[in-house]
Amino acid sequence: MEYEVIIGLEVHAELSTKTKIYCGCSTEFGGDPNTHCCPVCTGMPGALPVLNEKVVEYAVRAGLATGCEIARESKQDRKNYFYPDTPRAYQISQYDLPLCEHGHVDINVGEMSKTIGITRIHIEDDAGKLVHDGYTGGTLVDLNRAGVPLIEIVSEPDMRSAEEAVAYVEKLKGILEYIGVSDCKMQEGSLRADVNLSIRPVGQEKFGTRTETKNLNSFRSIARCIEFEIARQKEVLESGGVVLQETRRWDDEAGEGYAMRTKEEANDYRYFPEPDLMPIRLSEEYIQNIKDTLPELPESRRARYISEIGLPEYDAGIITSSKHLSDFFEAAVAVCGNAKSVSNWIMTDIIRIAKDKGVEYNELPFTAENLAKLIMLIDKGTISSAIAKKVFEEMVETGENPEKIVEAKGLVQISDEGAIKEVVDRIVAANPQSIADYKAGKDRALGFLVGQCMKEMKGKGNPQILNKLILEHLNK
Amino acid sequence: MKNICELTAHEIREAYESKELKVTDVVKAFYEKIKVDDEKIKGYITLCEEEAIAQAEAIQAKYDAGEKMGALAGVPIAIKDNMCTRGVKTTCASRMLENFIPPYDATVIKKLKDAGAIILGKVNMDEFAMGASTEHSAFFKTHNPVNLNKVPGGSSGGSAAVVAGDLSPISLGSDTGGSIRQPAAFCGIVGLKPTYGLVSRYGLVAFASSLDQIGPMTKDVTDAAILLNTIAGHDEMDSTSAKLDKKDYTKALVNDVKGIKIGIPKEFFGEGVNSEVKEKVLAAVKTFEELGAIVEECSLPATEYCLPAYYIIACAEASSNLGRFDGIRYGYRTKNYETMQDIFRNSRSEGFGEEVKRRIILGTYVLSSGYYDAYYKKAQKVRTIVKQNFDKVFEKYDLLLTPTAPSTAFDIDSKINNPLEMYMADLLTVPVNVSGVPAISMPCGSDSEGMPVGLQLIAKHFDEETLLRAAYTYEQNREVQ
């Protein structure tokens, strides 16, 4: 039987405010355990939360960037449950009156573009972290992350495949980076997704029973988890079983998901309005002000790269998918003026290197300015493209200025005709057979001779001049 | 001159200024009396003698140097044991927090320290402020100094008993449904519950966040005004604290109620109210009339729904507020566990007393899915109606006058096994918390057993001035009854 897959995502993004959502503690990642803490975020008796206004501003920015309606009045609610990483035994979240509702983002998968609805965006606080202590065999609690602000972005069940889900998260990540509300470092857990998935026979109107897999923190695990869950649900249905409504975990190492708890075991969170906090009231002026100061979004940059700079659509899409990459591109172009060349370096080398090193585009080992300088060295004819690749590898290793690398390693291209001619004369004289071959119509012989000359010149010969001089010899 | 321990805070303060008394002598006098009398009254859980005497010496030195001193400089005070005191145990009279030493001061404690007040110690209460008799303390029962066989009321029973028993001139209590006013009435002292939001709750271990309020418990109205001056004011650590200009409440201490309109809500004199209590309170009404106040009967029709609505809201909030006592980070942890669930379940089962568990279970129930609308939501609707009731009568009246409690102090152990009867002790005080308005309880005579009767004055939101003015006038003019 053919099945249709229905996917909705809940994406949690840590906001990049300097301080936590309800106290003045630092939100910085890392730090010795329990050093970014105070009576408020450790849930001491008597301590009270005070809402960080930046959190509201960031969430509203996210809402406006995804076309949401912004609530003029919203409130915060307590979500009650016991877990050692939740020091108050309740999370402060938003239940029935979220800050943002009814938004959407557009995604592209292959040639297709599609609109994914956003049900709501609300603010809440993150929990602490449980650390297994190998020494005692016990579990320790680190509350540095407790109280770091999050937004939860809930999508409509509009996605139909793993590709669409990944494209949606990529798009969201790009938007959040662009508007500067989250650094979206998936490997540090500052962007993570819960996948709600069900399948139904094609043509059936009623949704199938859905499962929710929690806390996926890479594009790869999102895609793999979805494929796994689709296959699992199909197998259950085809063997005559029923899919259970349950919460699941994904084990990325094992490449499989497993059930955590069923609907019957689910928590009753006993939501009720947080009495320690006042309702959030936003004026028209406040919202308009955020709207007016929203930075350029990926869609508009992409259009600009295509129409103004003349980049191919595909390249423009890739480069603008990440704010860091797009910023890198713009910074390099600002220095060297050669947008096509910068784009080529990004598409062929830089994306690969970021992936290999597992870093974000703002964490590359070299600066955009240095890439621009490298391109200028090529454009001026100081080095050849072949040498440039070597210089680039050196930049990746050391982050050094390419001009200095070229100088230190004596890689400056030799364009002096006299010097090149001397080498060419010598090589041609030593290879009479090649000349004969060429004259007999074997073009390969030219390449051989160029190669021999380059070898002699340790790759520094200007290839155009070299070619020209050899041809002169051959055509005598 | 009176014995040192019988003095009010303002009398002590004046004696420092006139050099009749030394701070160190006063503080030592209280500790000496505590050592003798608290054996019987059992008001204090923790004494801070060493720190208090060191502080007394430092403050006396400043007096001697002729420095300008704060309104409470060198004045001893007792603190209900649910307000966090840095470095001093804050137990909430619970096994759960028996050894809990807070790393920070509540805002009110900070303000008291800044004003030079000297904390004598932390006083007993019903566990987590849940109760009306201080019999629900996990440690011991406090006795009423007027008659040691009687309860002092609750939950701020320790705060009331130490002031009535001359073991501290003033104290702080907290009031969620009457916990300042009812023990003040039972012990024959003054207890003021300020408007919700006037005094910061930061550092007050929460029972019901939308109802809790800290307030003064004192021997006279003047002390209540002075203490309120010190603790009131906006606190950026408490989002529910009101942003208002600072007032000097002692300016409201004017001996004049002429033309003040006082409403007598008939629902507060109904069946459940003891006839001797009614009689004394109506005598006070007469006194007000004689002093020139305009007195009329009025009605708060939603009053009968206040008590159930109150217990639903208070328990719902408590069930969430007390979730943090899970045995993980601080407080009591069971020795009997294998799994994480065991730690939670057994720590809470063993660490909380019966009354606290009863309220957590009740609160959990009313918030559960499927029951929320029928209980919590409906209670919130009642709350809105009660507020409207109060707004309406306050269009016409400046104050309301009622009994504070339906009875006088009852015998120790007489109601401990009957929670419903115990809850009735809050009947006349909870409407005030539900609507958020301020109220004061002060003595208006005694019953045939010699137990004090309290009258309650209720004012509009943030109109503590009219409240204090009327209370002060009555205090200056009442005949010994």
Image (cartoon, rainbow, N blue to C red):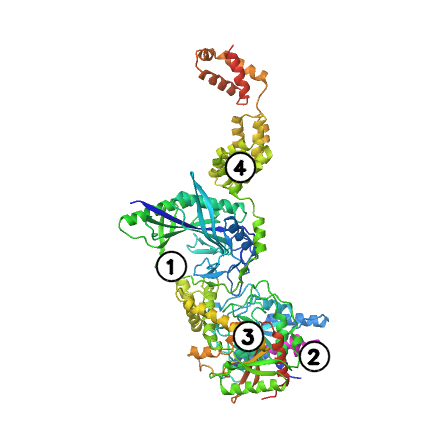
Q: Amino acid at mark 2?
A: Glu
Give the number of the disc on residue B466.
none
Q: Is residue B301 left or right of residue A266?
A: right
Give the number of the disc on residue A305.
4
Task: Identify residue for label 3.
Answer: B392
A376 vs B146, nearest the viewer: A376
A458 vs A5, nearest the viewer: A5
Q: Amino acid at mark 3?
A: Lys
Tell me residue B402's x, y (percent): 54, 81
Task: Identify residue for label 1.
Answer: A266
Tell me residue B136's x, y (percent): 46, 75
Q: How many marks?
A: 4
Q: Chain of mark 3?
A: B
Task: Identify residue for label 2.
Answer: B20
The answer to whether mark 4 and mark 3 are in CB contact below 8 A is: no
Question: For the residue labelled by badge 2, is the local secondary structure a helix, a strand or a loop?
Answer: loop
